[in-house]
Amino acid sequence: MRIIVGISGASGAVYGVRLLEALRAMADVETHLIVSAWGEYTIANETGKRLEEVKALARFCHDEKDMAARISSGSVLIDAMAVAPCSMKTLAGIASGFSENLIMRAADVCLKERRKLILLTRETPLSAIHLENMLKVTRAGATVMPPSPAFYTKPATIDELIDRTVGRVLDHMGLPVDDLKRWGG
Ligand SMILES: Cc1cc2nc3c(=O)[nH]c(=O)nc-3n(C[C@H](O)[C@H](O)[C@H](O)COP(=O)(O)O)c2cc1C
């Protein structure tokens, strides 16, 4: 499978990092990473990881300004894309079809080609503009998946909360998740 991961400058860079780690552990998954300028900032600020360490988790990395990258074209087959986390700016860019950088362009391509696009939107509280943009992208075919922790699994650590959210993203990508705690009734 070929998967695109975008990391934009909302809080929660760790979601993108954990997603890349999970995808890296899977055979036959080719990952393409795009990190926005503010995504770089939050990676450093929130995870303490160097950008190079995060980039090393992906098979291919693309500059957000590189509109000539392979994944900018609908002719390149992509199975799914996740923007994790997705800032309100990136959300707005996707909702309006204003492909200002490669994250927005690749997401736009996913929508026009009817491919899976999962947005881990992160902001709180939400304005009417944010909510309208979420509705717009949902109507266009995206899955808006704010990282909202579930407590019925009784998570003991922050890592557990993060991994559960990442597991749900993998579920939506159609990838196997062995150790995801599911509600058993
Ligand atoms: C530490 C930090 C945390 C931020 N958290 C959020 C957030 O949770 N949600 C959001 O929409 N923007 C957040 N922002 C603002 C975005 O980084 C800013 O709007 C930026 O222009 C987004 O650009 P990008 O989507 O291209 O990464 C944050 C900025 C900083 C510096």
Image: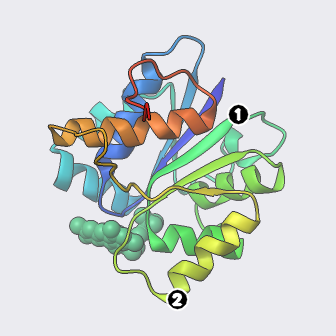
Residue bearing mark 2: 128
Residue 27, x across and y down, in percent? 54, 10
Q: Secondary structure at mark 2?
A: helix
Residue bearing mark 1: 79
The answer to whether any part of residue 98 appears in the image is no
Amino acid type assigned to the residue bearing label 1 in the image: Asp
For the point 61% across and 77% down, which residue is it? 133
* Classed neighbour count for the residue bearing mark 1: other residues with Cα under 10 Å, few (<14), some (14–19), many (≥20): some
What separation in Å lies between label 1 and label 2 (alpha carbons)?
Answer: 31 Å
Measured along the vertical axis of the image, is residue 11 above or below residue 170?
Answer: below
Task: State the mark number for residue 180.
Answer: none
- The reply to whether the C-beta atoms of the residues labelled 1 and 2 are less than 8 Å apart is no
Measured along the vertical axis of the image, is residue 166 above or below residue 141?
Answer: above
Quadrant, the C terminus? top left
Residue 173 as seen in the image, left or right of residue 17 = right
Amino acid type assigned to the residue bearing label 2 in the image: Ala
